[in-house]
Image: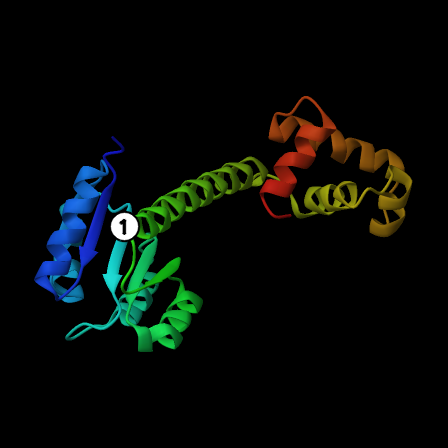
Amino acid sequence: MTGRRIVVIDDDAAMRDSLAFLLDISGFWAATYETAAEFLNDIASGPLDCVVSDIRMPGMSGLELVRKLKADRIICPVVLITGHGDVSLAVEAMKAGAVDFIEKPFEDEVLLRAINGALEARSTNLADDAAKLQAEARLADLSSRERDVLRGLLAGKINKVIAHDLGISPRTVEVYRANLMAKTNVRSMSELMRIAIAAGL
């Protein structure tokens, strides 16, 4: 049992019920809504792990929902269900941030695969984001000159070259290197490089 909460948005009641049943027996916790507006009004009612939405609905469409979530910085994967004529719309939604689209009619396994793929990608992204924020925090106290030295080290340059590039002495570069190690609390140059790369330096 995964216990992940999957939101299903579809104006077709029979479709909502069948998807909720499929998700329940697959170990998910399903919450269903008839329209995107109804879902957005209730968005704070529980955790949000993945949204499965029809693309064509009265009021706000699936494409508009993807854009709205992105604009509001609500990080949640959206899988769109699309009719035969909606593929170009679905592709547009993918460009806007939807993670997948499934054409009707579809097998249960296809939807479950899409949801599991979206959840895995989300975990990876969140882990990457957390690592980036952590790395940035460790570099936050560096002066601009220390960052310059770090960029030089990241480019594989030796102290003498970094010194020449920055117009300082090699001895001063050594001092900056020692400061970098102390401020970021690392024990090795490779650890410092990993942090710099994770921070996107």
Q: Where's residue 154, x and y in %? A: 75, 42
Please give the name of the residue rendered at 39% of the width and 76% of the height, measured from the top-left corner: 88
Please give the name of the residue rendered at 36% of the width and 62% of the height, measured from the top-left corner: 101
Q: Where's residue 108, x and y in %? A: 27, 50
Q: Where's residue 45, x and y in %? A: 13, 47
Residue 178, image quadrant: top right
Residue identified by numbered label 1: 108
Is residue 46 in view?
A: no
Please determine whether, in this image, residue 124 is positioned above or below residue 74.
Answer: above
Determine crowd level at label 1: few under 14, some 14-19, many 20+ residues with C-alpha closer than 10 A: few
Q: Secondary structure at mark 1?
A: helix
Total labels: the figure holds: 1
Please determine whether, in this image, residue 131 is positioned above or below residue 82.
Answer: above
Please give the name of the residue rendered at 15% of the width and 75% of the height, measured from the top-left corner: 58
Quarter placement of the N terminus:
top left
Drawn side of residue 81 relative to residue 34, left or right: right
Drawn side of residue 167 relative to residue 107, left or right: right
Drawn side of residue 177 relative to residue 55, left or right: right
Kindly identify the amino acid type of the residue bearing the numbered disc 1: Asp
